[in-house]
Image (spheres, rainbow, N blue to C red):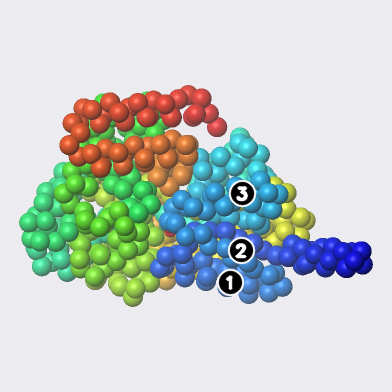
Amino acid sequence: MKKIGVLFVILTLVGSIAVLAAQFSIYDWWTAGGEKQAITAELNYFHQLYPNIKIAQNPVAGGAGVNMHAVIKSLIFAGLPPTTFQVHAGWEMYEYTSANLLDPITNLWKSEGWTKVFPKRIQELCSYRGQYYAVPMDIHRANMLWYNMSIFKKLGLKIPTTFQGLMNVMAKIKAAGYTPLAVGDRYQWPAAMVFEEPLLAIAGPKTYDEFFQGKVNYSNSKVKEALKDFRYIMEHYVNVNHASLTWDQACGLVANGKAAMTIMGDWANGYFMGLGLKAGINYGAVPVPGSQGVYNLVIDAFPVPRGLSPTEKEYAYDWLKTIATVKGQAIFNRIKGSIPARIDVPTTGFNSVQVVNMEELKKDILVASAVHGSEAPAPFVTAWENALTVVEYHPSMPLEQAVKYLNGVNGRYLTPKELVH
Ligand code: BGC
């Protein structure tokens, strides 16, 4: 009996050691069309460079990382950190750094010369209190409008230059019997983009930043206008089944001509390309009207968690070096729909939307997306998105009452204490 017990313990130990043997364990939320192919291509490239590293990819479905971070936190608290994981640079990353859960990688940034090839603003977002903590894989743009070119042609419509103009176009599209704007807010964040991007377009980058810094609230006339438009759009202009669809299913409505437009980051570009559609022929893309000249940044980055074994840490560094190369950035971003975070990647192989965005990034005013983790603290973002849903689902609530309610939420979550990092 005793012998069997000892044998059992030995076998269990051997088993666990086998399970825990060093491997490259990476977490991301790239499971939809376009994004899935992009990460697969990058992992294939990594495998080519480091054929001896065993890769364990762990995708957690739910755009914008809505589900993945809970998994990462449990793993870290169980003492089993993954080798690396997808994180938005900025506030989402600060949640980990302020709890001392990531290893600084300033030496790597310096020895690899990355301080010379990534834009300053991106470097700031990848840093915390003077140290670098992550490497950017891409630059996405949140303030983009995607439209079905044949619907626009058929109805003789043009993309306007102001947000008010876009509201008028939506009215015309509805009158012609089409859904003007596709939304898939099964996870809330795509609806929050129908407030965030109009806010940028209507109020401009300064007020946009002040709003997320708690300096301006919904009583500001421009913010109030964005709120009013958000509620009107969600009540009158979106597909009735929006609450049961995901972001990519909403893009699908634009692709198959069931809806005329969608407001979404340029991962939509990757989704459309993945369907074999061509920018400028099947679908058009512009900054959300009114936000021309402003680039709303969404940065996917990869950090090194604390507590890795020396071998795992080496693997993490190998990955970071791979994604930071010109080739690594080109392979991923061409498919993803985004643009490289490095400024020295040639435009070869990128589509027209990406080439325009690469140009615009150089001259535009840069802000960062709150919906996508960079601009504001995570507890605020969750409370803010929930509160927007409340006023969206109560369209008869008078605007002033909605303003009062939403100001209360902002006041509770955007206090000076919350905003320290
Ligand atoms: C990420 C993108 C991703 C999108 C949808 C965003 O938050 O930054 O990389 O494609 O979510 O999943």
Q: For mark 3, what is the residue?
A: 74
At which x and y percent is residue 331? 50, 68
Three-letter code for the amino acid on which mark 2 is drawn = Thr
Q: For mark 1, what is the residue?
A: 45
Q: For mark 2, what is the residue?
A: 322
Q: Residues within 10 Å of mark 3 (few under 14, many from 20)?
A: few
Q: Earlier in the sequence, mark 2 or mark 1?
A: 1
Real-space CA distance between mark 2 and mark 3, rounded to the nearest whole angstrom: 27 Å
The residue at the point 72 percent across, 56 percent down is 313
The residue at the point 40 percent across, 45 percent down is 371
> Helix, strand or loop at disc 2?
helix
Residue that protrudes farthest toward the front in the picture: 1
Q: Could you tell me if residue 112 is visible in this image?
A: no
Real-space CA distance between mark 2 and mark 1, rounded to the nearest whole angstrom: 8 Å
> Helix, strand or loop at disc 3?
helix
Q: Quadrant of residue 158?
A: bottom left
Q: Which quarter of the image is occupied by the N terminus?
A: bottom right
- Name the residue nearer the viewer: 144 or 306: 306
Q: Do the numbered discs 2 and 3 sit on residues whose CB atoms are within 8 Å?
A: no
Q: Residues within 10 Å of mark 2 (few under 14, many from 20)?
A: many
> Helix, strand or loop at disc 1?
helix
Q: Quadrant of residue 358?
A: bottom left
Q: Which quarter of the image is occupied by the C terminus?
A: top right
Residue 174 drawn above or below residue 93: below
Three-letter code for the amino acid on which mark 1 is drawn = Tyr
